[in-house]
Image: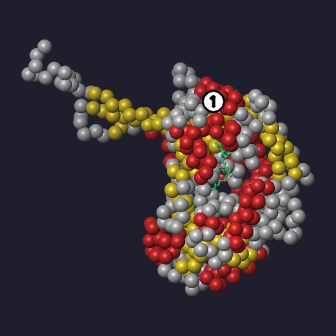
Amino acid sequence: MAIPIPSRQLFIDGDWREPVKKNRIPVINPATEHVIGDIPAATAEDVDIAVEAAHRALKRNGGKDWASASGAHRAKYLRAIASKILERKSELAKLEAIDCGKPLEEAAWDMDDVAGCFEYNADLAEKLDKKQNASVSLPMDTFKCHLIREPIGVVGLITPWNYPLLMATWKVAPALAAGCAAILKPSELASLTCLELGEICREVGLPPGVLNILTGLGPEAGASLASHPDVDKIAFTGSSATGSKVMTAAAQNVKPVTLELGGKSPIVIFEDVDIDKAVEWTLFGCFWTNGQICSATSRLLVHESIAGEFVDKLVKWAKNIKISDPLEEGCRLGPIVSGSQYEKVLKFVSTAKSEGATVLYGGERPLHLEKGFYIEPAIITNVTRSMQIWKEEVFGPVLCVNIFATEEEAIELANDTHYGLAAAVISNDLERCDRVTKALDVGVVWVNCSQPCFSQAPWGGKKRSGFGRELGEWGLENYQNVKQVTRYISDEAWGWYNPPSHKL
Ligand code: NAD
């Protein structure tokens, strides 16, 4: 049954508004390759209008503006958004699935996480009221110091297509909780659920201009937002190449940025593991969300003593992963998000072959699916450290395998990358897990699992995976300035201008 695609405009100043240039971008279902709708394409002119609306929402002239309202006041809106998301969960999950190809079951989990993230940030917003005016102890008793936490202002939020609504929420929820006004620019490849967030904001009566949603092309709408002189901060999630451009654009106005970028994360399997459990974590860690996860543990490092049995099982199990239309029950691997991304993934596999690697399984279109951007999960061995497949992020269902003999070698191989987002360590020896965890040059380590992620815990990487942390209290602090207020409390004159030996 066809899923109705709402026809939306840009969400600016609390309502729908046609883009100034009236352009639209087609929406393609990656499972069928059919055009199923379109979204508005914002340009620099629309960004200007949205930035003005956001500033109006924050006008600091007293009264009930968003920035100076209490955290408890803002929390009510975040909770109302969370409950609307849950009310519309099944419809939103379907939209997500047909927009980016994510299996429906996973899209439904995402909607729970979206609601949970809004609720968690509502709790944080309430706690902010208590955190205000915290005192700082000073070494001189003639001074008293306290801190005021202020929203950073108008923020630009630029997000990718792999978790369209969830990645947007990781930014929108803390930004709004902190008292910022935001302009969200979702990926042009999957914007449908982010536009529905606009409708939800309208329904819950979020004050106009607090959240503006501009769909559009990256080099046009995204670049205008990143370089806008009246935007106070940019939070970006996407590829390292685009992240670098965003940072350059933001630097023109010396605006702070947080960057959540790509990865090439390792999963290290020691010889003492339960092989079946470790095989499942390896498959899940690399092929979940169709392999399009920033933190995909796409470099398997397995101890030489179990490598043969481990890889045989991996291949056997990978062959049983259900590849189908994301809406089909039991689907575990849907299509790649777009035709160009599909071609890119296939090229990675063919380059690996031409460089001398062995594709044990997958990396091709499944025979039973003639249409759609589907690729069988690929398992590649005989990978050397000079090969492209070892070094570069594929962002598709491709796992490359390497073998180690010692703990030191495993750590060296794991850290042999420009990226530093995440890593997984699987071993029954917890002391060894602790040692390896400390030696890994990444922002997130999973022990005896891969990929769990919670609104309460900080998320972010090192090296070319970016900097800054989202989620948890750290995520909200990204959207605040801390103002130091120091008061002189002595009755005595300070005594610098008129020392006792020098009378006027
Ligand atoms: P992308 O870099 O192509 O696009 C990301 C966003 O940037 C999109 O909204 C796009 O329109 C916009 N954009 C493109 N060019 C721009 C420009 N010149 N100026 C401003 N904005 C611009 O990334 P993608 O293909 O959408 O997403 C995949 C990438 O995202 C992968 O590298 C993945 O690892 C990364 N990612 C990282 C995390 C994380 O938490 N670290 C999470 C999800 C995805």
Say above or below: 113 vs 429.
above
Residue depicted at 71% across the width and 75% down the height: 359
In the displayed image of the protein, which residue is found farthest to the left? 501
**Foreground of the two, 443 or 272:** 443
Say above or below: 330 vs 216.
below
Say above or below: 352 vs 254.
below
| Mark 1 lies on residue | 51
Say above or below: 410 vs 438.
below
Residue 20 in the image: x percent, y percent?
A: 76, 28
**Foreground of the two, 463 or 91:** 463
Residue 493 in the image: x percent, y percent?
A: 20, 22
**Residue 383 appearing in the image:** yes
Secondary structure of the residue carrying tag 1 is helix
Please name the amino acid that badge 1 sits on. Val
* The C terminus lies in quadrant: top left
Residue depicted at 10% across the width and 22% down the height: 500
